[in-house]
Amino acid sequence: MMFVGVDHGTSGIRFAGLKKERRKRGVGEAEVCELSRERAAELSGEEILSEVEGELKIERDGINLLALTYSMGDGFSKIKSVEKVPNRGVRSGEGAGARVGGGTKVFDALKDAGVPAILIPGIHAGSEKLDRRMKFFSHGASPEKVGVAYHLYKKGFENFIFSDISSNTVTVAVASGVVVGAVDACLGAPGLFQGPLDLQLLREIESGRVSANEAFSNAGVLRKRWVGGVRGGVRGGVRKEGEEELVLDALALFAAMEISAMQVLMRDCGVGVEASRVFLTGSVGEKEEVKRRIERLLDSGDGETETLTRWSAAVGCAEIAKDVFYGEREILGIEVEL
């Protein structure tokens, strides 16, 4: 028995293979591997499949079910067989973020290989059990965040908030095992590269100097030109003494603000702060120095937040595949329709 999860992330495409027996290497019961989006774009579909088979120590014929994520996932709201979802599950190819082509290559390679596969939707205004007030925003989180949430749910948590801090920042709230809220990368806290559009960026868009997508893709703390910030470091990273501390301070502040906002929602859903847990993930979120900053800002004692590895989304997707295979028909409030 083998179940595979695919995390179509901003910086790379991660795979997790979950078997019944525990293995010595990997994350828990899962074998894991990663392809950069740039490398995936250069490979043929067969080369992608062969590389993943080798890394996960599987053969495609041995995969019982694969759970796939792709882009925004805003074109559908139920977990479905990949063949039943048109346009790879997105409303439009136009949107927020860099378009490299690697994720599309992986999606098409897996679909064309005939591997039994389901597609996981994102969290958006069409999500049935999302808090109705959160549907004010068209989009809340991309599909791999459902994988992160399910991985936590399978660990025994039913009430929690997690913030994924990396190239961008996305925060998700789960109450009584149902996703009730999500704040997308273009709405609230910035990440390293991407972030929300403020007055400065709106003016640049209106003047025609940049497109909306270009503005979003360069609105993170390392790319945006901001007073007292990392000046001119569009792609060069931190350059001056003290800038690294400022970057971490800013990321932690805005993530903590977003988490606090989700605690308000959770409390209104009947789950108090003391009854829910806070988790951090992503390339920045898993750093101990960021964890300490966020705990201080949330006025949490040591150990009040926990970190997850960058593999959590892929592993969670594999866990979704396994449970759907064995008959589960609702995942975190998302209906399964096969």
Image (spheres, grey):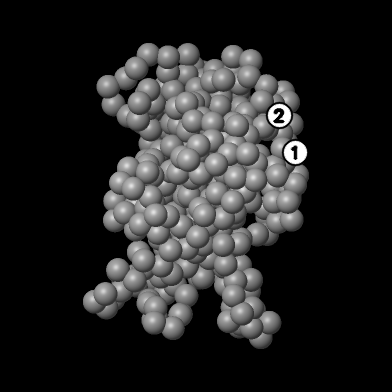
User: Mark 1 sits on what residue?
Assistant: 128
Indicate the secondary structure of the residue bearing disc 1: loop
Front in this rendered view, residue 39 or 126: 126
Mark positioned earlier in the residue sequence (1 or 2) = 1
Judging depth in this view, the residue of 278 and 213 nearest the camera is 278
Residue at image coords 45%, 27%: 155
Nearest the camera: 51 or 220? 220
Identify the residue at the far bottom of this view. Answer: 207
Label 2 is placed on what type of residue?
Glu
Q: Position of residue 259 (x, y in %)?
A: 51, 53
240 w.r.t. 72: above or below: below
Mark 2 neighbour density, 10 Å: few (under 14) some (14–19) many (20 or more): some
As helix, strand or loop, the secondary structure at mark 2 comes to strand
User: How far across and down, in percent of the image, does residue 87 sit?
Assistant: 72, 44
* Pointer 1 local density, CA inside 10 Å: few below 14, some 14–19, many at least 20: some
Disc 1 vs disc 2: Cβ atoms closer than 8 Å?
yes
Residue 226 seen in this snapshot: yes
**Quadrant assignment, res 94:** bottom right
The one of 196 and 120 positioned closer to us in this rendering: 196
The spot of residue 83 in percent (x, y) is: 70, 31
Residue sitting farthest toward the left: 241
Q: Position of residue 149 (x, y in %)?
A: 53, 37
Q: Residue at x 63, y 15 (%)?
A: 327
Tell me: residue 69, above or below residue 226: above
* Rendered image: mark on residue 9: none
Which circle marks residue 335 in the picture? 2
At 60% from the left and 62% from the top, the residue drawn is: 187
Residue sitting at x 56%, y 55%: 261
Tell me the amino acid under the disc marked 1: Glu
> The C terminus appears in which quarter of the rendering?
top right
- Mark 1–mark 2 Cα distance, whole angstroms, equals 9 Å
